[in-house]
Amino acid sequence: MSDIAINVENVSKVYKIYDKKTDRMKDALGLSRKQLYKEHYALRDVSMQIKKGETLGIIGTNGSGKSTILKIITGLLNPTEGKVTIDGRISALLELGAGFNMEYTGIENVYLNGTMIGFTKEEIDAKLQGILDFADIGDFVNQPVKTYSSGMFVRLAFAVAINIDPEILIVDEALSVGDVFFQAKCYHKFEEFKKMGKTILFVSHDLSSIAQYCDRVVLLNRGVKVDEGTPKDMINLYKKILVGQSPADKTSDSIASSGAPEDEAKAVQELNAGADDGGNVLWSSHFELNPDVNEYGNRKAEIIDFGILDENGMWSGNIEKGTHFTIKYKVRFNENVSDPILTYTIKDLKGNSITGSNTMYEKVNFGEVMAGEEKTIAFTQLMNLQGGEYLLSISCTGYSGGDFMVYHRLYDVLNFTVVSDKNTVGYYDMFSKVTVS
């Protein structure tokens, strides 16, 4: 008996892209002898195997083919080439709306989904109370699902997916919609499933969840399988791809524009160095910035660039817990400033200040800084925060004539993720060493 639950063999998915609607019609009717479309590969020759009882994660940037491969595995799409073999009953929680009739009530959709998977009415009757208890959406189960909030929808969808006793559970990002308490409930169910020997295929942008729950990870990029391996190795490779510093991403715009190998090396070097060493690429361009950043100050000094470096010296919005990282930013002084104070603060998503420091606390004195000068500050420290999402604030402040001055402050300027495969209580991990005797 095979120990492979899902076998994906050389799967490709090609879409025809037409410039005009009339071209699509001509092609369908065979009215043109020339090719009227361009081919777009959502997936190209992808192969992978998921063993029974294994939790496999799939990661990659938007447009890498993650959702496409899940839809092919679940039968919602047919591959252009290749084949998929499944050994076990699948339950899938894909994007909101998949498998649900929006006009039906919650109860009716429970029976619809159960029937599609192959259960009889009597079998669904026996599981119904467990589904309703897990979803916990009250009387809304008797209302059409089109009236549900996204949170209620995902609660019901996940409750159905995990309570119909699947052998293979497939989840695509949907858990990010639920509230934190429901997410904790779902992840506890993941742990139960793993202990029961169920197979889980998990797609998420939440790298902490990928690191914590997955046995193995497959990395996709632009429809191509880049590599597979341990969560730590694949997350590190993914971070390189995000900033164009991976050999697997030679087609990135910043490198594709270069021809010779030495030009490619220079392009990668500039991406890593940012505005240093004559490069024109801003450090901040490697991050997703807050469009509603709270920015103010008298601009006697101005923050002109900023970013976060991981333990490998790469610009990254994903920092692994237990590693050193650097918050780095550059300040241009438009007027003479005496003893400026450069600061950083890290907050949680609720706005609570978790930690931070500044040059005054660290006993770094600048003295008199003259107009036209630029200073680069780098705060390097060990990442002890629990896995999750955080916000970074930076500022240049000081005192003039005994009065506190804000020269330039950027509140919540960017978001970054702490990646962890183990979280403890509270905000910090004390990295306890446990002995039993």
Image (cartoon, rainbow, N blue to C red):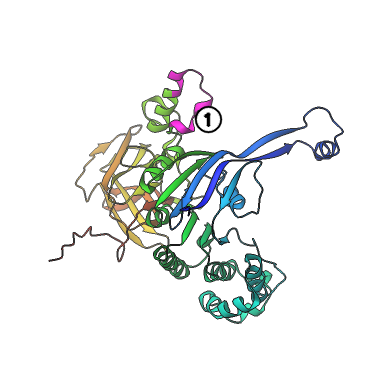
The kind of secondary structure the magenta stretch mainly shows is helix
Taking depth in this image into account, of 145 and 220 the one nearest to the observer is 220
Observer-nearest of 207 and 369: 207
- Return the residue found at the far front: 1
Note whether residue 437 is visible.
yes
Mark 1 residue element: loop
Image quarter where the C terminus lies is: bottom left
101 above or below 85? Answer: below
Closer-to-camera residue (96/287): 96
Quickly name the residue at label 1: 251
Q: Is residue 300 among the parts visible in the rendering?
A: no
Circle 1 crowding by C-alpha within 10 Å: few under 14, some 14–19, many from 20: few
Q: Which residues are magenta?
A: 247-264
Residue 105: percent from the left, percent from the top?
68, 75
- The image shows residue 413 at horizontal and vertical percentages of 43, 49
Labels in figure, total: 1
Relative to 55, is 131 on the left or the right? right
Residue 377 placed where, x, y %? 30, 40
Side of 43 where 353 appears, left or right? left
Residue 356 lies within the magenta run? no
* Residue at the image point whose x is 45% and y is 29% from the top: 280
